[in-house]
Image (cartoon, coloured by chain):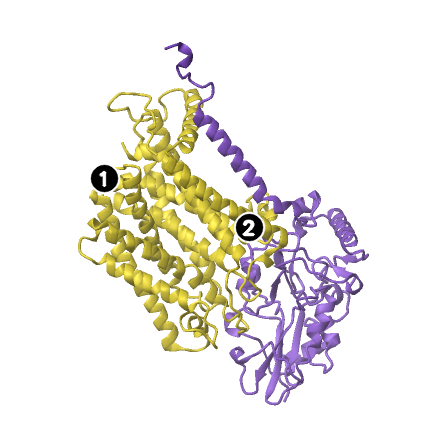
Amino acid sequence: MTTDLTPAEPAVPRRTVLKAAGATLGAAAFARAIAPLAAWEPAQSVDGFLQKHYKALTKVELKAVIARLEQETLDATGVDVHIAADEPQEGVQFAYALNLSICIGCRKCSEACHKENNHDRASGQSYIRVLEMDQGSLDLAHGDSTYDHPVPAPGKFYMPVQCHQCENAPCVKVCPVEATWQEKDGIVVVDYNWCIGCRYCEAACPYHARRFNWQQAEVPAAEINPDQGYLSNRMRPQGVVEKCHFCLHRTRKGKLPACLEACPTGARVFGNVRDPDSEIRWVLENKRVFVLKEDLGTRPRFFYFFDK
Amino acid sequence: MSSAMPQQSPEPSPPADSATAGPADRHLVSYPRFLLRAVTLATDGSPLFYGWMTLLTAFALVGVHAWANQVAHGMVTTHMTDQVSWGLYIANFTFGVGLAAGAVMMVIPAYIYHDREMHDLVLLGELLAIAAIVVCVLFITVDLGRPDRIWHMLPGIGRLNWPVSMLTWDMLVLNGYLALNLHIAGYLLYMRFLGRRPNPRWYVPFVFVSIVWAISIHTVTAFLYQGLGGRPFWNTAILAPRFIVSAFVSGPAFVLVTLLALRRLAGLAIGPAPVRTLTQVLRVTILIDLFMVASEVFTEFYAGGSHVASAQYLYFGLHGKAALVPWIWSAIALNVTAAVLLLQPRVDRRHGLLVAACVFAFAGIWIEKGMGLIVPAFIPSTLHELVEYVPSVNEWKITVGIWAGGLALYSVLLKIAIPVLKR
């Protein structure tokens, strides 16, 4: 009967206490859930996060970016690399031709690409895929890229496929952020620091020329090629797309692509089609050349031919 | 789940809102109060509501954790490859866009046929569209290798490849659609909070725009795929019409089930007319959808040639690889069963049957326009390599997490809106 026994209205309603407890628990659970992000090393400084598109960089900014990237590689691998940013040369249009009559399918080109371009060692990544095809058919459905026997096998011919640097490139069209584009000398390049990793280009490419960095590529320090290019073979970050760039860090300095130098049969012909005396020009004018999937209208700069 | 939003003005017939009436500073006071009320309504409810939200939050957190792992360790945590470079995420994204579009397209009858009772469902559809778009944006985000660079896609500060890239179109129309639906739903709820009758001038034109916009979001999403000449499985003009028709199945099916659930759980009074209208929509659209699938299958297999390889892989398997075969035949079985159930007489009054039909149709479309549409385009690869794809456990966790998050958002939005629907 005393007033003491009357249940008093609590200072804080029970419901509010419960809500607060729920919210606290939820926040704690959320913090726990995102904990793995703490281990995330995107090799990214604030400068890296805010870095502008390659084409928007001034000369001074590009120099600073390259210095930062070289330092990052030094810190991560202990290797002192040099990253160049060679411009396309005036009056140069690159093209590539491959003689299917003499290619023996040894995959030396693929291996040279693997080393030159600092590809992930464990997965054996390369920009070149060599298809073993049945004599008598150009149907890719009968090709096999996983053959494992002495070459050349009887009744077979071999067709290495890499980026065709299409003039009407589907991959460039679909990129939502202009992270990939065609340079004046015809090479389709990727800004690895601008790509968002949506892989729309991978879906669009009819030649399976693009590769995605599903994880950070691992190359032993002793095997890293220190002669690098910003738009070519520098160490690529995790989560971005890459592709064959006709070894532009070599070819823009007058050297030949690594795949061509490695070819033991001389099946590969590379050069400037604007030069009337070039070997590539002679091949295009005198051989019965063809391109893959011509009906798609991609206008490749990569040609195939048979000479017998 | 039934606390009503208070009416500030107790008059039986509140005056219509007019933009000029009342000083603007009144909104400065009442709008924050409206938001506060919304938060209160969203966090206050029955034990059933708390249990439901806790469950969804738990699933969503599992997804968040799985995504954090994916970002930290790379996309190698998925089972996607350079051959099959899109998988479960993009499949669910595509389906989600359909759901968002379908949610609003189902209000077309309300306006075209001046169906007063359907008007009540406009809000329900707009809210579903909001939740579905958020789901879509999340699926795109988790599919990115570099989510930290998502700002590269923002107009102004990023570098948008517009108008050439269809993905930029998709980003713009999806966000525009989200804004439209936020405006319509927000306006209707705010007017209700003020106790005023919504002024049709401030929302009906937007509803019309959002209906057209709904068709555009799904058309643009279809164009993402059908514009790729290197993928014969997608490179077909029927893809966009198929997307629209299947959206007309998944959207109304979801709304129908929601309506019937709300009637039971939240005591929402719903007349038979909207259920009948939606059932009629479903009856027609599911048959058109099946017809289009049949037309597609005929074209592929009758002509033959190398472009049939993907369809061959999807429906029958190719060179002994057949991971998708059980999926696609399940989808066909589900859709055909749903179609048969929907053709039953008076199915709109036999709710057990109706719910079963909706669930079957929803699941069938989810497979058909998800995994069944995205994955086969990559198998065989453009160089005819046969690499199969089965999602990883981490991918499933993220996927379930995103759907749980979307469902939680929809539940909260409904919780806030139910008092309006009850009027």
Q: Which chain is yellow?
A: B
Circle 1: is it few (<14), some (14-19), or many (20+) Cα within 10 Å?
A: few
Residue B123 vs residue B57: left or right?
left
Which amino acid type is marked by label 1? Arg
Rendering coords of residue B357 (x, y %): 28, 55
Residue behind mark 1? B116
Q: In this view, does B149 lie to the left or right of A265?
A: left
Dot 2 or dot 1, earlier in sequence: 2
Where residue B198 appears, x then y in whole percent?
Answer: 31, 30
Q: What x and y, as percent, mark residue B141? A: 53, 49
Q: Give the amino acid type for the residue marked by disc 2 in the picture.
A: Ala
CA–CA distance between discs 2 and 1?
A: 46 Å
Return the chain for callout 2.
Answer: B
B288 to B414, vertically: above or below: below
**Is disc 1 placed on a helix, strand or loop?**
helix
The N terminus of chain B appears in which quarter of the rendering? Answer: top left
Residue shown at 55% from the left, 40% from the top? A30
The residue drawn where x is 32% and y is 45% is B258
Do tags 2 and 1 sit on the same chain?
A: yes
Q: Which chain is purple?
A: A
- Regarding residue B109, the answer to whether it shows in the image is yes
Q: Is residue B205 left or right of residue A103?
A: left
Q: In which quarter of the image is residue A35?
A: top right
Depth check: B176 or B326 in front?
B326
Which label sits in the foreground, 2 or 1? 2
Residue picked out by circle 2: B66
Quadrant the C terminus of chain B occupies:
top left
* Chain label for disc 1: B
Q: Which labelled disc corresponds to residue B411?
A: none
* Between B408 and A124, the one nearer to me in the picture: B408
Q: Residue furthest front?
A: A1
